[in-house]
Amino acid sequence: SSKSMKTDRNTYVGNRFVCVKNPHLNSMDEDILYHLDLGTKTHNLPAMFGDVKFVCVRGSSNRMKAFAFIRKELGLEGSEEDMQDICTGTDRYCMYKTGPVLSINHGMGIPSISIMLHELIKLLYYAKCYDVTIIRIGTSGGIGIEPGSIVITDTAVDSFFKPQFEQIILDTVVTQNTELDKELAEELLKCSKEVPDFPTLIGHTMCTYDFYEGQGRLDGALCSFSNEKKLDYLQRAYKTGIRNIEMESSVFAAMCGLCGLKAAVVCVTLLNRLECDQINLPREVLLEYQQHPQKLISIFIKKRLGRY
Ligand code: R2B
Ligand code: URA
């Protein structure tokens, strides 16, 4: 049977620098950020990334380019260079930088985002970045709310509705805190008042290891439960304050919290899971919904930069 222990959340107040929690890194002569195709000896990370203040992460790499829109939105004098993928030597992740805004994709699910975050956090640390806000923008399944709504996560919860992320480290289950920055969530909610086109709310987000059975769907290749059981589960989730379901928020909240990054999760809902399982929106509606989080985020960044 596995042992269990609780990690302390970093009580990060004074130190505004992005930090790592790994004593072994000190004794490494070089650190290769393999999945990003960057390294401490091959790249001048402080020169490349030292001015980063906002990191936007999202699932797909295709949509990453769409984020270059922020350059226009922010009125930043973008060079063609800004449109170049920084992680050229790898097709795992794509990264774009425009002024103080770094955008990177994370793939689907906890393992994929976790690998990216290890390397991204080390990158920000080596670059001596400070006062960094990181926001995951993405899609999700809503519970009891209108599709197209945005949910700003206050706490990520697991499939048992618990506000924690259980990571297996060696043969120990380590439990980590998944609370996100409350002030940042409120600040984002305030920004949403300026985009009246879609409802935005703060709620809990359930993070699962699977899209199908793991999210109570009846339409996967496998299903071992009834419609009644599904609805009972989702209704109980709703009662605890869960408003959407996705697949990365828990490890994102845990890792960013431990490393001194102010973090937020902003997801649009593509369907109401109390009504259906399949995402059957017309392409153009889907594309429109996916713009909602980035519209909100660009207002937020513009405000922070005093350009709104
Ligand atoms: C939301 O959408 C993806 C699954 O379709 C997954 O990455 C997530 O969290
Ligand atoms: N992403 C998810 O993880 N679940 C959904 O239902 C929709 C998008």
Image (cartoon, rainbow, N blue to C red):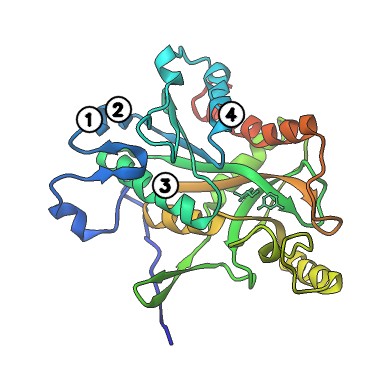
Element type where label 4 sits in the image: helix
Against 254, residue 303 (above or below) is: above
**Which of 239 and 48 lies nearest the eye of the viewer?**
48
Q: Give the alpha-carbon distance from disc 3 to disc 2, as whole Å.
A: 18 Å
Q: Earlier in the sequence, mark 1 or mark 4?
A: 1
- Three-letter code, disc 4: Ser
Indicate the position of residue 34 as horizontal and vertical percent values: 31, 44
Residue receiving disc 4: 298
Number of the front mark, 3 or 2: 3
Q: Earlier in the sequence, mark 4 or mark 2?
A: 2
- Three-letter code, disc 1: Asn
Quarter occupied by residue 213 = bottom right
Image quarter of the N terminus: bottom left
Tell me if label 4 and label 2 are in contact, CB under 8 Å.
no
Q: Residues within 10 Å of mark 4 (few under 14, many from 20)?
A: some
Residue receiving disc 2: 48
Tell me if label 3 and label 2 are in contact, CB under 8 Å.
no
Q: Give the alpha-carbon distance from disc 4 to disc 2, as whole Å.
A: 22 Å
Name of the residue lying farthest toward the bottom: 1
Q: Give the alpha-carbon distance from disc 2 to disc 1, as whole Å.
A: 6 Å
Q: Give the alpha-carbon distance from disc 1 to disc 3, as whole Å.
A: 19 Å
Number of the front mark, 4 or 3: 3
Residue receiving disc 1: 44
Specify whether 234 is left or right of 152: right
Element type where label 1 sits in the image: loop
